[in-house]
Image (cartoon, grey):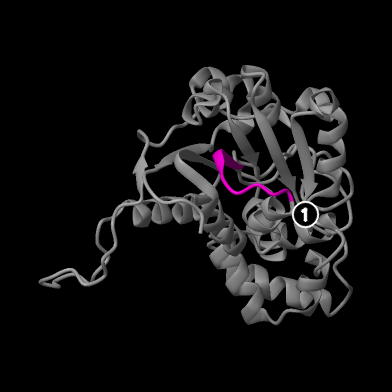
Amino acid sequence: MNYELNHIPVLCEEVIGSLNCKNGGFFVDCTVGGGGHSEVILECNRANRIIALDKDINAVRYAKARLSKYSGRLKVVHAGFEKLMEVLDKGNVNSVDGILFDVGISSLQLGGDGRGFSFRSESGLDMRMDQSSGETAADFVNKADEKSLYAVIKECGEERSALRIARAIVKRREKERIETTGQLVSIIESVKGSKRSRIHPATKTFQALRIHVNNELENLYAGLRQAFSVLRKGGRLAVITFHSLEDRIVKHYFKYLEKNCVCPSGTLMCTCGKESMVKIIGKMITPSEYEIERNPRSRSAKLRVIEKLKGERK
């Protein structure tokens, strides 16, 4: 696969407008991937500067090479967004004007590079964004008990057949170690059938394992909290998600920041003292029909944006 030709960043114009990039400022791209969003931010104003993060070393190398002409205004760092404050502290950056999260798997990772993200190609069952640490998906499916497998596939994949798939995995590994995407797909198809609809039978289970192996939901929440902390007053945080679990975390966190009071329902007088810290900018944004036709992977994208009303980083 030619990644250069297949990499199309999602909701670019909407991101530029939401983050006020044309006004100039210091930005953070928390998931640089192929560098598409960073590039359009740098292009729309020559005063813009960016620190870009990614926990996938392949993405870091690719983005550095692809965006080398912006090296004076761009720094690409090998780190997950759950380490955002650590990265900014090392760069002596105290606050920023805008932060972008484009959460989910990138075209680079789906490109059949032998890492197990895609069920459409035969490869080892790894699924780690950062291959330098942590257990692989193969480690998990071969060691976890049925209850743990069920919980991950059900909760992280929202898979209705989670229990049957978990049992099938346990049964298969009694005969052989599950090492490849092909083996896992065959197990799932033995439960759900191989009939193809718009959604492949293995989609939700692969999603669940990837989320679990990379601790994605917990890291997203940690990254959002740090991002809000380092925004200057008037700065904006924009988050693109691709499935309901991610979007739910973003939506609930943004609503919490917007609330004036979080005392229990029925409390006669506010004792929490919380004040609204953000303004939610517009409604959730989704791709246009034109963008979806041009880039089918954008179909499930959702963009939410907030603006910080008060408070600087402490």
Helix, strand or loop status at disc 1: loop
Examine the structure image and report whether residue 92 is included in the region drawn in magenta: yes
* Quadrant of the rendered image containing residue 45: top right
- If the image is split into quadrants, where does the N terminus sit? top right
Depth order, front residue of 142/9: 9
Q: Could you tell me residue 227's position as x and y percent?
A: 55, 51
Residue 34 appears in the figure: no
Query: In the figure, 292 relative to 181: above or below?
Result: above
* Quadrant of the rendered image containing residue 59: top right
Q: Please report the bounds of the magenta region as a residue range.
A: 91-101
Residue beneath disc 1: 129
Depth order, front residue of 70/18: 70
Q: Could you tell me residue 136's position as x and y percent?
A: 81, 66
Q: How many marks?
A: 1
Examine the structure image and report whether residue 286 is included in the region drawn in magenta: no
The residue at 18%/68% (across/down) is 270
Q: Is 276 positioned to the left or the right of 146 in the image?
A: left
Q: What residue type is labelled 1?
A: Met
Residue lying furthest left in this view?
268
Crowding at label 1, few (<14), some or many (≥20) Cα neighbours within 10 Å?
A: many
The residue at 71%/41% (across/down) is 52
The residue at 28%/57% (across/down) is 275
Query: In the figure, 70 relative to 129: above or below?
Result: above
* Quadrant of the rendered image containing residue 16: top right
Depth order, front residue of 105/62: 62
Residue 243 appears in the figure: yes
Depth order, front residue of 110/222: 222
Q: Could you tell me residue 7's position as x and y percent?
A: 74, 28
Q: Is 296 positioned to the left or the right of 249 in the image?
A: right
Query: In the figure, 184 relative to 120: above or below?
Result: below
